[in-house]
Image (cartoon, rainbow, N blue to C red):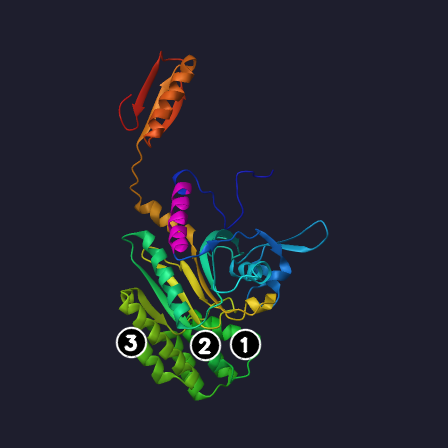
Amino acid sequence: MVNKNIIPEGTRDLILDECIRKKELGLEIENILNKWGYKEVITPTIEYYQTFNGGFPNLKEEDMYKFFDDKGRILVLRPDMTIPIARVVATKFKEINPPIRLRYNSNVFRVHESLGGKKNEYTDCGVELIGLNGIDSDVEILITALESLKVLKETGYKIEVGNINFFNSAVEWLNLEFEQRSFLAKLIDEKSMKELEEYLDMLKVGDDYKNFFMKLPWLFGGVEVLDIGEKYAINNEILNEIKYLRNIYEILDNLGYGDKLTFDLGIVPRLNYYTGIIFKGYVEGIGDTVLRGGRYDELISTFGRDLPAVGFSINLDPLVQLEDEKSNRKEEKYRIIYNPKDIVVAIKQGQVLRNLDYVAELVPSKDIEGIKVVKEGTQQ
């Protein structure tokens, strides 16, 4: 017998006040993004499989929900929002000169491992700054991310910044296959030190490269990490990227955001379209990353228009749960208990209360004569 009361793994129902909190949180963040000049776009929930399958080896086939249309073409529930935005910019914004600032608030679908604790459906609220490169645009996107997390009020938060080129500039000299690079990146990102050392020995890399990769996972912390990173840099490109991060820090520190920044030179994101700075956002009380972003200067060119870009997205769902735990929302509610023959008077009374910004719920009862208005939390 089919159990109709269960839902697919990795999904959940949002009910009652959770829905209100999620909408309010999304609107607060969207309001901040709008004030920075980011305009909303809405892309289809369903996309062609080939949109995500071409040129993104780290976005695996098994990570996507796939099905067929009536013509036999493979469709997917979008597993990412940046790629659809890149498609939209290349096809719908041909006549618009950059910079282009876009924002979205959309559900994303990704198949995660069973029992991993991650949701397979979640809501991403984010922005993409398209057509600008260099430190100005990177600083803008980082400040926008920090300002967005301010909606959490007293909750502490940090953004951890790195650069994919620390990893890329080192591995390009090793002539590794894609699978080897991906596995090496995974070990560094997960800070699996024993496996990392064994894998580097198996690859027979030189001592200088081995020392660099073994140190990379530990290069995280405050701005002093950049000094340590300089000591282990094995080429000028890495030194230049460290200098770039230092310049970013100095600008943000001058603007009052210095205490919200940390650095992790060993960040290696799963999606492989990033080309420069990468960053993650963490919030006190939530164990996992709630914000992810970075620069992706080559992604839009895969759709036919060569434009640099940088952006980020915030996963709203864990923030809603956090707000739920902290919530002390006081909403004044009234119950209007009335005999059904007095429905017109009851509705009018309800409208008076709603116009005063109260919640008014109609409760028909044949056991009452006339109308009784009861404030929630008081004796009837």
Mark 1 — residue?
A: 180
Query: Residue 165's mark?
Result: 2
Q: Are marks 2 and 1 in contact (CB under 8 Å)?
A: no
Circle 3/circle 2 CB separation < 8 Å:
no
Residue 190 lies, in percent from the top left, at 43, 69
Provide residue 46's location: percent of width, then percent of height. 60, 52
Above or below, 236 against 362 in this view is below
Q: In percent of the image, x 56 and y 64: which residue is there?
A: 59
Marker disc for residue 224? 3
How far apart are labels 3 and 2 at the CA level? 19 Å
Based on the picture, tell me whether residue 34 belongs to the magenta stretch: yes
- Amino acid of disc 3: Glu
Report the mark closest to the observer, 2 or 1: 2
| Distance Cα–Cα, label 1 vs label 3 | 31 Å
Q: Which residues are magenta?
A: 19-35
Residue 61 seen in the figure: no
Q: Horizontal placement of 359 versus 379: left or right?
A: right
Q: Viewer-proximal residue, 246 or 1?
A: 246
Sequence order check, earlier mark of 1 and 3: 1
The image shows residue 4, relative to residue 146, as above or below, that is: above
Q: Secondary structure at mark 2?
A: helix
Question: What amino acid is labelled 2 in the image?
Answer: Asn
